[in-house]
Image (cartoon, helix red, strand yellow):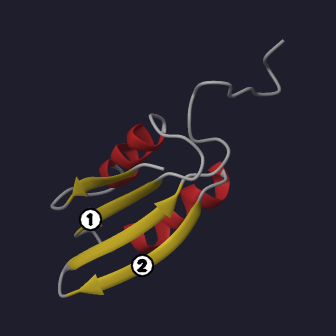
Amino acid sequence: MTSVTVDARNLLCPLPVIRTQDQVARLHPGDFVHVLCTDPGVLHDIPCWCRIHGHTVADTSREDDEIAITIQVGGSGSEEGRRTHFDV
């Protein structure tokens, strides 16, 4: 199991979600991503993105202006083996 950190501090929407998405695409189900942010919009955006893509928000914390969100990658994390209804 892998655990990585995405430093998205001082970035505004949509960049924290894009950076998180890029990192998750390199990981496998069960891996963890710790996202560090300062944009309060991530408290809504990242959990919403996780629900849509099958990932789980394992933890959220906030200290002063810094927000930390821990995501556990779900079954659609890695591009390898991913299929959509458009694949034949």
Query: Which SS class for mark 1?
Result: strand
Image-based side of 86 in relation to 39, left or right = right
Report x, y in % for residue 5.
29, 55
The disc labelled 2 sits on which kind of residue? Answer: Thr
Residue that lies at the very extreme toward the bottom in this rendered image:
64
Classify 10 Å Cα crowding around label 2: few (below 14), some (14-19), many (20 and above). Answer: some
Q: Is residue 47 visible?
A: yes
Report x, y in % for residue 38.
22, 70
Query: Which SS class for mark 2?
Result: strand
The disc labelled 1 sits on which kind of residue? Answer: Leu
What residue is shown with label 1?
A: 36
Q: Earlier in the sequence, mark 1 or mark 2?
A: 1
Check the image and report above or below for 31 versus 81: below
User: Which one is in front, 74 or 41?
Assistant: 74
Check the image and report above or below for 12 versus 38: above
Q: Which mark is residue 60?
A: 2
Q: Quadrant of the C terminus?
A: top right
Check the image and report above or below for 2 versus 51: above
Q: Quadrant of residue 10?
A: bottom left
Classify 10 Å Cα crowding around label 1: few (below 14), some (14-19), many (20 and above). Answer: many
Report x, y in % for residue 61.
35, 82
Image-based side of 72 in relation to 15, left or right = right
Residue that lies at the very extreme toward the top in this rendered image:
88
Q: Quadrant of residue 11?
A: bottom left
